[in-house]
């Protein structure tokens, strides 16, 4: 079974500052990794995903994430955040060996202030 | 128009009442899912369906049932609602055949059981 840990429940940051949202996963098999974003009063939408290949993945809205197999991490980064990035961010993992459910982390709330 | 719609968006009910949450999609996807979101717990899978005749339990199916009326419709029922089923419920869809395809989420239904 897979599990996902998002250590930071909330990350406050000032506008135009860089941000990193941390995600660590646990799995005995190879996995696919995802970051979803949930804006206030909306459903989740995909930011980016890692399936294979280059470990640096670029997503929408200037976000990127780096897959680190040895550290079992998939941290999300943005070099300069905007007020509009205020949202909850979920890391998720799914095994690539037959259907397994998509396992979500508990989420990190990013609060961007002026 | 939204691709994945959920009705109702908000519902307050009493303990013991039967409740149905409905989900419709215009994306033509084969797979549909029901999740619940609780603060600090992320999203947990209740049921999923790969097609009209294929319905499976997720990790927290107790107290819930589902019906896949058509490819585009997937309903979640609470036969006898209880207060700890108070949560935000999301329907999601994905294209079939591979597990790493993006899931598309509806806007959610906020259910309160008194």
Image: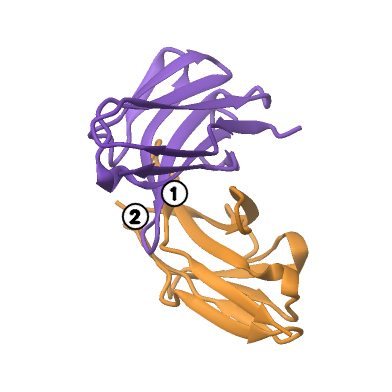
Check the residue under mark 2 and report the chain it is in: A
Badges 1 and 2: C-beta atoms under 8 Å apart?
Answer: yes
Q: Is residue A8 left or right of residue B73?
A: left
Q: Looking at the picture, do discs 1 and 2 lie on one chain?
A: yes
Marking on residue A94:
1
Q: CA distance from mark 1 to mark 2?
A: 7 Å
Instruction: Specify the chain shown as orange.
Output: A
Looking at the rendered structure, the secondary structure element under dot 2 is loop
Q: Residue at x 36, y 59 (%)?
A: B41
* Mark 1 crowdedness (10 Å alpha carbons): few <14, some 14-19, many ≥20: many
Q: Position of residue A66 (x, y in %)?
A: 59, 70
- Image: B38 above or below B15: below
User: Nearer the N terminus, badge 1 or badge 2?
Assistant: 2
How many numbered dots are placed on residues in this image?
Answer: 2
Spot occupied by residue B108 in the image (x, y as percentages of width and height): 53, 42
Question: Residue B71 placed where, x, y %?
Answer: 55, 16
Name the image colouring.
Answer: by chain
Q: Which quadrant of the structure image shows residue A84?
A: bottom right
């Amino acid at each position: 079974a897979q599990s996902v840990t998002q250590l930071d429940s909330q990350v406050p940051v000032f506008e135009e500052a860089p941000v990193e949202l941390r995600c660590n996963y646990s799995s005995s098999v190879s996995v696919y990794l995802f970051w979803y974003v949930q804006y206030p009063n909306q459903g989740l939408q995909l930011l980016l995903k890692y399936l294979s290949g280059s470990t640096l993945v670029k997503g929408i809205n200037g976000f990127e994430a780096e897959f680190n197999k040895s550290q079992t991490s998939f941290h999300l980064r943005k070099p300069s955040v905007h007020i509009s990035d205020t949202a909850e961010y979920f890391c998720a993992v799914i095994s690539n060996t037959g259907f397994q459910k998509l396992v979500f982390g508990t989420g990190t709330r990013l609060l961007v202030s002026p | 128009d939204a691709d994945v719609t959920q009705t109702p968006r908000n519902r307050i009910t009493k303990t013991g009442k039967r409740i149905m949450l409905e989900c419709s999609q215009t994306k033509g996807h084969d797979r549909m899912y029901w999740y619940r979101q609780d603060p600090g717990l992320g999203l947990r899978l209740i049921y999923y369906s790969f097609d009209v005749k294929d319905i499976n339990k997720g990790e927290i199916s107790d107290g819930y049932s589902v019906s896949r009326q058509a490819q585009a419709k997937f309903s979640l029922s609470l036969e006898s609602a209880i207060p700890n089923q108070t949560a935000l419920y999301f329907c999601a869809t994905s294209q079939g055949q591979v597990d790493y395809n993006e899931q598309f989420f509806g806007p959610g239904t906020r259910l309160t059981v008194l």
